[in-house]
Image (spheres, helix red, strand yellow):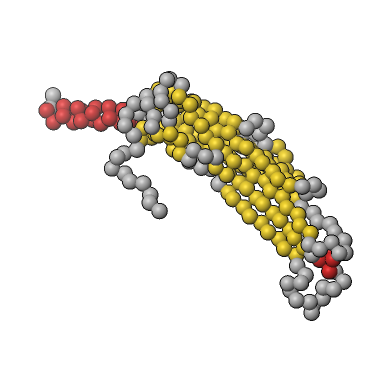
Amino acid sequence: MNTKKIATVIAVLAFVTTVAFAQSSGSFNYSADTLACTDISGTLGGGTPKTALTTTMKVSSGTGVALVIRPSAVVGLLTDLSLSGKAGAGTVTASAQSGVQFQVTVTSLSGQGPATVTPSAAVTFDDRFIQISTNLFSLLSTCTSLTPATTCFFDFNETTLSAHSFDWVVTNMSSGDYGITVTWTPYTNFTAPNNALACVGPVVLTAEQTKIFNQNTGISF
């Protein structure tokens, strides 16, 4: 056989072996809940009744091994306000708030030491605060085009936070199995007759093994 051909075959085999090794060193897993939130003419409903998804990952050995964990979710929020008052009532205020926070925890299943999850605190995927204030009930008879703007008011205040998906990075890992759990906590704050609701779904949790190289540097602020 031609020596040149033999060298070419060896080079190709070496390349295939390298590719196969690179592919086998990584892993991916996921968990999902497909129940969906609904918004029918402003009425919020549906969503998943449970507040956790779990999956597992087998991690290989080696310096710089890490996991990238990403929960993605549809979040529905409802904030319903109403105001009532009478003459002489002064300023009337109503507010409502609803939101959902997500938290990722990683548990060693093969006797390894604890992994480091970043961020370690819960992340707000959605939050909405609405407040209405007015003094018009007590001033309806006196508010005219000639009245100073600061005398009669109707104030609407809305504050929102939003993520919908977020990456958690898990480091300080050893070879073995890890359990991954994502939990979410809907919360509301309102006083009747006002109302606030929150729902979540569908939700997908993905986890991917990756490698942090020492020559890379992080982003500085």
Q: Picture coordinates of residue 186 (x, y %)?
A: 65, 39
Which quadrant of the structure image shows residue 157?
bottom right
In-front residue for pair 169/89 = 89
As rendered, which of 79 and 16 lies closer to the eye?
A: 79
18 lies above or below 93: above
Identity of the residue drawn at 87% across and 61% down: 86
The relative height of residue 61 versus residue 41 in the rendered view (above or below) is above
Q: In the visual, does 193 lie left or right of 38?
A: right
Residue 40: where, in percent of width, then height? 74, 45
In which quarter of the view is residue 148 placed? bottom right
- Residue 22 visible in the displayed image: yes
Q: Residue at (59%, 41%) from the top-left corner?
A: 101
Q: Whole-percent x and y of residue 107?
A: 48, 26
Residue sitting farthest toward the left: 3
Classify residue 84 by image quadrant: bottom right
User: Looking at the image, is 30 positioned above or below residue 43?
Assistant: above
| Residue placed furthest toward the bottom | 146
Residue at position x 57%, y 38% in the image = 102
| Left-right relation of 6 to 45 | left
- Left/right of residue 216 with respect to residue 131 in the rendered view: left
Q: Residue furthest top?
A: 110
Q: Residue at x 85, y 73 (%)?
A: 142
Number of labelled discs? 0
The answer to whether residue 42 is visible is: no
96 and 59: which one is in front?
A: 96
Residue 147 percent location from the top left of the image: 78, 77
Quadrant in which the N terminus is drawn: top left
